[in-house]
Image (spheres, helix red, strand yellow):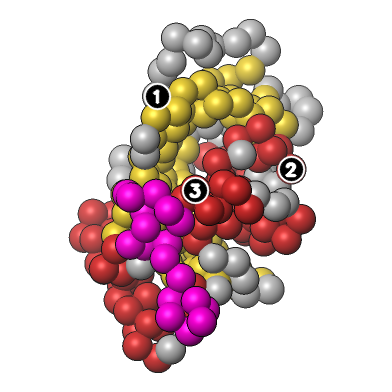
């Protein structure tokens, strides 16, 4: 167990080192119910970049199954009121999301491409996120399209595969005429509320067939295979 925890910390430390080299250090925002939120300066912008981290009592396959169910993201993602899958192929999804904004601010929407990267040595999955354009979902009236977005999900196996250390990081320019301080205020709640929602969702949503497909997938088997102590 100590060996796996050390490996987990090394994975996060490696990504932190890259982040510091590119953008500078993180600053702690909150630590609430085991969900840690940090922020940092975004080069060339008055907006902040935010990330959240939490330990979730579910294996990676279950978390991936929840993420795969795009239509139900409205049940747990922060302020998400519409979620649709536009395109899916091996290791790549394109998703449309619309975020509710309090009056008189217009709703924001976005098209996000997610690309999955498996790390068998670290028992980890990383999903790179970026805002894209897509012909199936042109900009709408009455909403502001977010085009500048980047981020990731990082899922690292813990507790012999029974739990997962999750990192959700995102930087997005909401566009429109919102002042930077208001955008930053709204954004700092996003990682915390999304991870709290994900914790709840893995307890109430069940996808046994999808989990089995993921575990048996040739591309993911090395990451998602159960540890010996759980397989016995």
Query: Looking at the image, which residue is at 43% across and 80% down?
Result: 228
Q: Which quadrant: the N terminus? A: bottom left
Image point (32%, 49%), residue name: 219
Residue furthest bottom in the image: 2
Q: Position of residue 82 (x, y in %)?
A: 68, 28
Please provide percent x and percent y for residue 19: 29, 59
Find the distance from the CA under tag 3 to the CA under tag 2.
23 Å
Residues under numbered marks 3 and 2 in contact, where contact means CB atoms less than 8 Å apart: no
Which type of secondary structure does the marked residue at label 3 adopt?
A: helix
Residue 75: numbered disc = 2
In the displayed image of the protein, which residue is found farthest to the front? 232
- Disc 2 and disc 1: Cα gap in Å? 24 Å
**Which residue is drawn at the image coordinates 40% and 24% (left, top)?**
132
Task: Give the magenta part as a residue range.
Answer: 215-232
Name the disc covering residue 213, or none.
3
**Location of residue 144 in the rendering, given as x and y in whole percent from the top left corner:** 58, 20
- Determine contact: label 2, label 1, CB under 8 Å: no
Q: Quadrant of residue 36?
A: bottom right
218 vs 66, left or right, is left
Q: Which residue is mark 1?
A: 132
Q: Is residue 75 magenta?
A: no
Crowding near the residue tagged with mark 2, few <14, some 14–19, many ≥20 C-alpha atoms within 10 Å: some
Give residue 147's position: percent from left, percent from top: 44, 25
Vertical relation: 113 (above or below) 17: above
SS at mark 1 in the image: loop
Q: Which mark is residue 191?
A: none
Mark 1 vs mark 3: in front: 3
The structure residue drawn at horizontal position 24% and vertical position 61%, both measured from the top left corner, is 18
Q: Residue furthest left?
A: 21
The part of the image, by quadrant, that contains residue 162 is: bottom right
Residue 229 appears in the picture as rendered: yes
């Amino acid at each position: 167990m100590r060996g796996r925890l050390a490996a987990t910390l090394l994975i996060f430390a490696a990504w932190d080192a890259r982040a510091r080299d590119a953008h500078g250090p993180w600053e702690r925002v909150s630590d609430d119910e085991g969900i840690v939120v940090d922020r940092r300066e975004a080069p060339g912008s008055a907006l902040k970049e935010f990330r959240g981290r939490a330990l979730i009592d579910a294996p990676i396959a279950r978390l991936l199954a929840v993420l795969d169910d795009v239509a139900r993201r409205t049940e747990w993602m922060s302020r998400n009121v519409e979620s649709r899958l536009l395109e899916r192929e091996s290791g790549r999804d394109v998703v449309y999301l619309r975020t509710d904004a309090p009056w008189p601010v217009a709703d924001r929407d976005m098209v996000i491409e997610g690309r999955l990267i498996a790390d068998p040595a670290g028992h980890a999955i990383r999903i790179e996120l970026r805002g894209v354009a897509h012909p199936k979902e042109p900009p709408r009236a009455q909403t502001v399209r977010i085009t500048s977005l980047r981020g990731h999900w990082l899922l690292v196996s813990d507790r012999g595969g029974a739990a997962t250390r999750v990192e959700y990081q995102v930087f997005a320019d909401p566009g429109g005429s919102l002042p930077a301080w208001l955008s930053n205020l709204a954004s700092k709640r996003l990682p915390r509320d999304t991870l709290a929602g994900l914790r709840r969702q893995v307890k109430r949503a069940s996808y046994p067939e999808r989990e089995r497909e993921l575990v048996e997938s040739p591309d993911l088997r090395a990451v998602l295979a159960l540890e010996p102590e759980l397989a016995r």
